[in-house]
Image (tube, coloured by chain):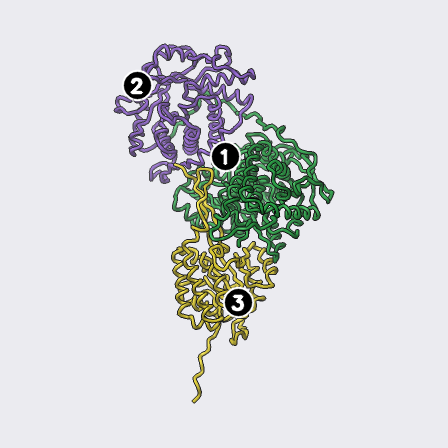
Chain colours: A purple, B green, C yellow
Amino acid sequence: MAQALALPRSVELPGGGSLPRVGSVDAVALEARAAELAKRSIKRDSKIFALELAIRMMDLTTLEGADTPGKVRAMCAKAMVPDPVEPSVPHVAAVCVYPSLVATARRALRGSAVKVASVATAFPSGQAPLDVKLADVRAAVEAGADEIDMVIDRGAFLSGRIGRVYEEVVAVKEACGDAHLKVILETGELGSYDAVRKASLVAIAGGADFIKTSTGKVTPAATLPVTLCMLEVIRDVHDETGLVIGMKPAGGIRTAKQSVQYLCVLHETLGPDWMTPDLFRFGASSLLNDVLLQLRKQRTGIYRSPDEMTLD
Amino acid sequence: MGAVEKKRSTLAPAGAWDYAPAPESRDIVSFEERYGLFIGGEEVSPRSRAWFPTVSPATEEPLAEIAQAGPKDVGLAVDAAREGFETWSTWKPSERAKVLFRIARILQERSRELAVAESLDGGKPIKESRDVDLPLAAAHFFYYAGWADKLEYAFPGRRPRPLGVAAQIVPWNFPLLMLAWKIAPALACGNAVVLKPAETTSLTALLFADVCRQAQVPPGVVNIVTGDGSTGAHLVRADGIDKVAFTGSTEVGKAIQRELAGRDIALTLELGGKAANVVFDDCALDQAVEGIVNGIYFNQGHVCCAGSRLLVQESIHDQLVRKLKRRMATLRVGDPLDKNTDIGAINSKEQLDRVTELVEVGKEEGAEIYQPPCRLPEKGWWFAPTVVTGVAQSHRIAREEIFGPVLSVLTFRTPDEAVEKANNTMYGLSAGVWTEKGSRILWMADRMRAGVVWGNTFNRFDPASPFGGYKESGFGREGGRHGLEAYMRFE
Amino acid sequence: MSARLPVRKTYKLFIGGAFPRSESGRTLDLEGHNVARASRKDARDAVVAARKGVAAWSSATAYNRGQVIYRLAETMETRRAALAAVCSGRREVARAIDRVVWYAGWADKLSQVLGGANPVAGPFFNFTLPEPTGVVAVVAPDEPALDGLVARVIPALVGGNAVVVVASEAHPLAAIELAEAVATSDVPDGVVNVLTGLREELAPVLAAHMDVNAIDVTGADGDVAALEVLAAENVKRVVRAREDRSPWEIGAFMELKTVWHPIGR
């Protein structure tokens, strides 16, 4: 394993001044804290603020075997103008698609600030030879992806080959060139928050710009506690190195209420500096419409029908 | 460490996100203008003809007038309890159980109303009265209801009998919950009670009188006398009581113990504390920070078992204190009825003065005071969450119970030193220990002289879990099977 | 030729495993012997010894404590004659020895009977265990001279406490004979301490002592109220005999500690 340059000082190997400290996580207390934050009551203006921010932070996603250029073009239209009736509603942060549809998305989004994110590295399992994974990444970048969402090799991680996980992230980061790298840990497969913490550190050490919970293909996907756990890693890394890492919970976030809960967790863990699409994203497909509905309800004071929102 | 490029955000952060006020509606509770005493199943005017106002500590707004029970009133209440006991103790235990179950249910049904009343009268955040005080109070009645007709299984080889009339004095920090801790086991065992709530927080006890009426508790089984410390003193001195259960300060507890000397009246005391919360360098740090915050800022630190002495292993002191201070900055101090409030009002002017004085003493002793920036309301009694570093065991703030949101931070080097310092107090109510090493948790738990030891958690309560102190923190247990023993004699 | 004179026994105090005279040098003529009249300072020394004793005794395994107390019964058995001479006789000695044996068996059963696991509503393991309160002062009852003393001292010992006994003024010899049995069993030094002398001098000193955790006033007669007032100064546990033999008699000298720990992955 190469020297972990980006790790906090306390995680350096002996010789760096202190013994490695990955740190640990108490599951019950973590979950209790997340549950407590989920009870924040966000009303009126502060709710509108949160809902609009949630839209600005959204990676509108489609990752189905049945994805077609038509489907992706429709989604891109929605990404740019989520609510045609209410032009003040901001566009989403990015669309997230498979590599084969990056070019389609790129064309559909021309002229807009919406970014194109592509999953890669044999998503979602990551079970392919490294050169295949790297080719996957390069293809997506060449097709115009601004952001790459890679998966870590959970098989390697769970069998204790942490160095291999680290080296893959390093290699993918290099293959990304200028593209931003989000590293998916697939937390639902890691088994414990301690493992999530360790994987987060490895991903960050390898060069992740963002760490991301899940592919959306495994249950559980994103949860509030696992997000809190990863935000705490980001905070520790920032404390010790100054490095600023982003966070992306993905999968299972379907309601406006959930998105506000995530923002409370973010707000009270990393503070206002992280309240930007540059550093926090939601990976979601059905969340957007619920946020739009709630936003309209908030503005009109009347409960809305789902039929008011477009299904793209 | 190589040079690390600090990545800058290209988009400006969204800016400060101020949570809009989210007040719980106070319409759900309506107070009478005046509350008499609850004696023999009826509200009666005090013979003393004395009344005093009860105010909201968050706004200083008067909420109602409360009776100041004098010696005659207390005597009447004890007589009523004696009569209540004569019937209640002959009830079939299974029927007594049903009454307690009813109380539990009614507390659940009226929980929002009672939670709002508790926060208004006592100043505690609604999220705590709603999520902690009320659910636990109801759970306590539910738990002891189940015991009422199973008492012969509680203590093998002994034949349990009720004691008679229990005089119960509760503090102002968890008014209704402490009432539940007292009344539920007493009634389950077949006793009648005269309960005296704290002077500043009588309203939920008086609302509880109405709960008793709804539950059809027989007259005289529960009697409530309000008033200041003198009412409590009359109660303890009254003829006809068989038991005193007191929760409050060590000073008053000692006075009660002296008062009862030679009278062969059963006594349980749940008194003060100065709990050590011991944090080892291998702990789950962020969760330890949460535990520390919950340990000392829960209920404004008005908690006898509060983790007010933080003992940190020296090697992580700076890191932990940094994390702690940052976390404190997110604590929301203000309107107790706002659902997002983490820290409410100090219960009384008197208590605020005491907290203020002790923190001043800490400054004079050379400790370093930190308070996160927070705007305190202008009316009412408030104290910002405070952490005091550079504290030594010899400082007054490390020895005296402050009973406010003030944490003293001390350091240790080895497990043995941690135990030594943790136990270096006349109190012994609770203790905390944070480490990922299982064997060390048990080693520490074994050695810390405290009635409750929280390993990798703090300030957890449950009706099934016995609670009570070592040393000058009192004796007797409340909660669990052990809590029954305080309300029984054995043949 | 004169007849052989018997060798008389000197009855001294029992503190920290040794048999010192009173530091005051005073004695009392009781039961036909010059019995040491312990002073306030002797009481102080006994509490210091007991505090040391409780550290060793309470950290011994329950199994070990049970064996040691059983060993005390064995030692008492071999001293039956001597013990019988200082109490009402052989039947009382037999009762006392059987009581010791009965309590010896409780040492490693107490926590199962007095403690337990508590089913709290949350992801926590929670258990309650009895622990010794610490240093216990025992004001010994006058009657029965030996068994009355044993009935108060042994329950305190079984739980892991150390005791400081204020011997009966009427029957100080029984207390010292018992101390000699204790000294020759495997009870660690300081776990049992015996003060002979005047109860009215000694009991208040122990009742007021800030490093005594509990006081058994079973033998205190008319002094109880005064002792209780003193005991309140450090919230001492004030214990009276309730039952002849019972684990709850042991429990009266014990604290209950409840430990919480999260259950999580």
Query: Label 3: how many residues lie within 10 Å, few (<14), some (14-19) or many (20+)?
Result: some
Q: Mark 2 and mark 1: span between their CA atoms?
A: 42 Å
Residue A138 disc label: 2
B378, B207: nearer the viewer: B207
Q: Is residue A141 visible?
A: no
Q: What residue type is labelled 2?
A: Arg
Mark 2 vs mark 3: tell me if same chain: no
The residue under label 1 is B327
Image spot of residue C12 (x, y percent): 49, 71
Image spot of residue B288 (x, y percent): 45, 39
C119, A169: nearer the viewer: C119
Residue C177 vs residue A168: left or right? right
Residue B36 in the image: above or below residue C110: above
- Check the picture and name the quadrant holding the N terminus of chain C: bottom left
The residue under label 3 is C143
- Check the picture and name the quadrant holding the C terminus of chain C: top left
